[in-house]
Image (spheres, helix red, strand yellow):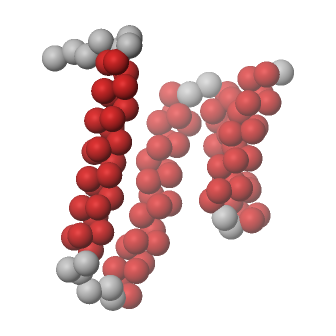
Amino acid sequence: MSIETAGLGSVAIVIAMALVTLATRWGGVFVMSYVPISYRVKQFINAMSGSVLVALITPMAVAGDNGARLALLTSAIMMLVVKKPLPAIAAGVLAAALFRQL
């Protein structure tokens, strides 16, 4: 199966991805409404965002170029300094952009 990516094909892909994202988010809320929120569940939820970030960044560090490695290093250092993921990610993106521009 293939979808033409010109014209309405790309719109169909975006709509399909939006529907899948919406279904997984609503499905997660629905499933978690039946799970009692204990201390262990809170720990799991808090650790999930970091593990997803690591799962996304690790392949770039292994197979990426020096810009990707600089972004990873910058993000790691910023995370240790400010202890907030959003500024760390922004600093990593900025470092990669500056490295590739220069």
Count of numbered circles on the image: 0
Extreme residue in the front direction: 8
Percent position of residue 79, x then y: 68, 60
The answer to whether residue 20 shows anywhere in this view is yes
Q: Nearer the viewer, residue 79 or 63?
A: 79
Residue placed furthest toward the left = 1
Quarter of the picture holding the C terminus: top right
Q: Quadrant of the N terminus?
A: top left
Q: Is residue 75 visible?
A: no
Residue furthest to the right: 102
Q: Quadrant of residue 8?
A: top left
Can you say whether 2 is above or below 81 in the image? above
Q: Nearer the viewer, residue 42 or 66?
A: 42
User: Residue 88 at x, y = what percent?
Assistant: 69, 54
Residue 79 placement, left or right of 48: right
What residue is rendered at 38% in x and 13% in y? 7
Image height of 6 relative to 62, above or below: above
Where residue 16 sits, quadrant-wise, is top left
Location of residue 4 (image quadrant) = top left
Residue 17, image x and y in percent? 33, 38
Which of 80/29 is in front?
29
Q: Residue at x 26, y 53 (%)?
A: 23
Residue for point 69% across, 43% down: 92
What residue is at 64 percent from the left and 35 percent from the top? 69
